[in-house]
Amino acid sequence: MKVKIDTKEKFTVLTPEEPVIYDNMADELAAMCQQYLQGSLKNLILKLNKVHDIDGNIAQKIIEIQQSFYDNSASFIVCEMNNKITDVFEKEDLLEMLNYTPTESEAWDIVQMEEIERELLDSNDFEFDTEDDK
């Protein structure tokens, strides 16, 4: 599968350059995405602006990839899907599970917000007032 890779400070944008992603490409797509979990830049944006259609199994595979990223404290966002791809996720009852944005810029914002959220949750620098403290 031919892809364009754009590395930013906090994430990588992976843009498949295939007009259709078929079922037989699912494992290759997963392997490409999973390799980023091993690197220093774990956050990944999957930009689908050049893809016109996907098979149903690809939609399921993307959900599985997304889950593996979140299981490893990393962000995975899909952006710039056309209506046909959105319909595939909807038909497979997966759209509500997908973390997606209309634009790449909005995907950047989500990565940055999730990074801040992880930093805050990992930090022990804050305390909550309890009723006993008052």
Image (cartoon, grey):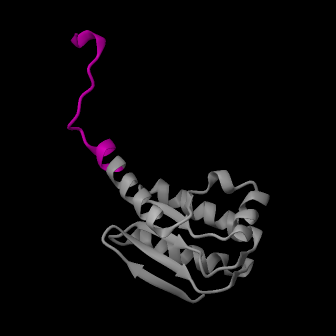
Q: Quadrant of residue 17?
A: bottom right
Q: Say left or right for 26 vs 134.
A: right
The answer to if 40 sits in the magenta stretch is no
Count of marks overlaid on the render: 0
Foreground pick, 68 / 5: 5
Quadrant showing the C terminus: top left
Foreground pick, 113 / 35: 113
Magenta residues, start to end: 118-134
Q: Say left or right for 20 vs 49.
A: right
Q: Residue farthest to the right? A: 91
Whole-percent x and y of residue 119?
30, 49
Foreground pick, 124 / 101: 101
Q: Say left or right for 41 vs 79.
A: left
The answer to if 125 sits in the magenta stretch is yes
Query: Which residue appears at 61% of the width and 61% of the height?
Result: 64
Whole-percent x and y of residue 121?
33, 42
Q: Say left or right for 54 vs 113.
A: right
Quadrant showing the N terminus: bottom right
Image: 109 above or below 21 = above
Query: Which residue appears at 32% of the width and 70% of the height?
Result: 40
Query: Which residue appears at 65% of the width and 67% of the height?
Result: 61
Q: Quadrant of residue 23?
A: bottom right
Whole-percent x and y of residue 99?
56, 57
Q: Residue farthest to the bottom? A: 2
Image: 4 above or below 80 = below
Whole-percent x and y of residue 131?
29, 11
Foreground pick, 44 / 30: 44
Query: Which residue appears at 75% of the width and 54% of the height?
Result: 93
